[in-house]
Amino acid sequence: MMEFNLEMEGFAVLAPESLAELERSLRDADFDLAILNWEGADRQVLSALQALKSGTDGRYVPLLVIGGPVSEDDRLVAYQAGVDDIMVNPFSVAELLARIRAILRRTSPELGGRIVRVAGLTLDVDSGRVSRDGKDMHLSQTEFRILQYLMEHAGKVRTREQIRAAVWEKAGQVEIRAIDVRITRLRRHLRLAGGNELIRTIRSIGYVLTDEQPRAQWERAEAEKLLSQA
């Protein structure tokens, strides 16, 4: 699941399943960041740490350790071994991505940021800035996340349930009606910035962000609906 989420965010991921496979990967590829799971025997983790340090030909590779609960002694051992950051369970995917980008901003500034551009919209994930045709828009945090999700899935119909699960950490506590209210506010911001309507309602399904004409988008939504029922 972690590999899937990282790939969805645009990262190229190698996931070796053994120490031997890790050592082979180190010979064949360059890494910008290594994530190690602390679950299991400490010796295996320390061996992986040593392999990473020795297999990069002296090149600095930032290390993020996840797992837990990790004791204070474990954390001290990890930091002494050269770990840059530690995440203790439980944590969300959003927090993991934020930690990864924070590390990359420090170690590889050219990799730390991410900008999404769709239909005249420019959204900077890290700075929280969004503009339409060069005109800044001021959104709430929730509106920003909804827009980010729709932009990252531009042209694809997203159900209210999908939006709720992607935007709210405690999605079960958020009523579906709240999605419609946020979308209405987001549309208002987009209209104030000028241009055509970008967020369209697909009746009985959800929403889609697109600059296509409504008829063409409706036909696409109907086709997607039929495919999903096949």
Image (tube, rainbow, N blue to C red):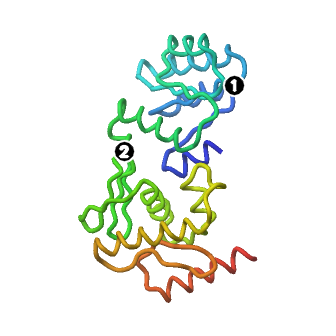
Q: Mark 2 points at which residue?
A: 113
Q: In this view, does 211 lie above or below 163?
A: below
Q: In this view, does 81 lie above or below 105?
A: above
Q: Which quarter shows the C terminus? A: bottom right
Locate residue 24, reporting x and y percent.
60, 28
Q: How far apart are marks 1 and 2 (CA)?
A: 30 Å
Name the side, left or right, on which 206 lies relative to 116: right
Locate residue 155, reporting x and y percent.
50, 72
On residue 39, which mark appears?
1
Q: Which quarter shows the N terminus? A: top right
Under circle 1, the secondary element is: loop
On residue 58, which mark appears?
none
- In this view, which residue lies farthest toward the left? 134
Q: Decide which of tag 1 and tag 2 comes sooner along the chain.
A: 1
Give 174 or 226, whichever is nearer the viewer.
174
Residue type beneath disc 1: Glu
Instruction: Determine contact: label 1, label 2, CB under 8 Å.
Output: no
Tell me which corner region of the image, top left, top right, bottom left or bottom right, holds residue 191. bottom left
| x 30%, y 62%: residue | 137
| x 60%, y 36%: residue | 91
| x 36%, y 59%: residue | 139
Under circle 2, the secondary element is: loop
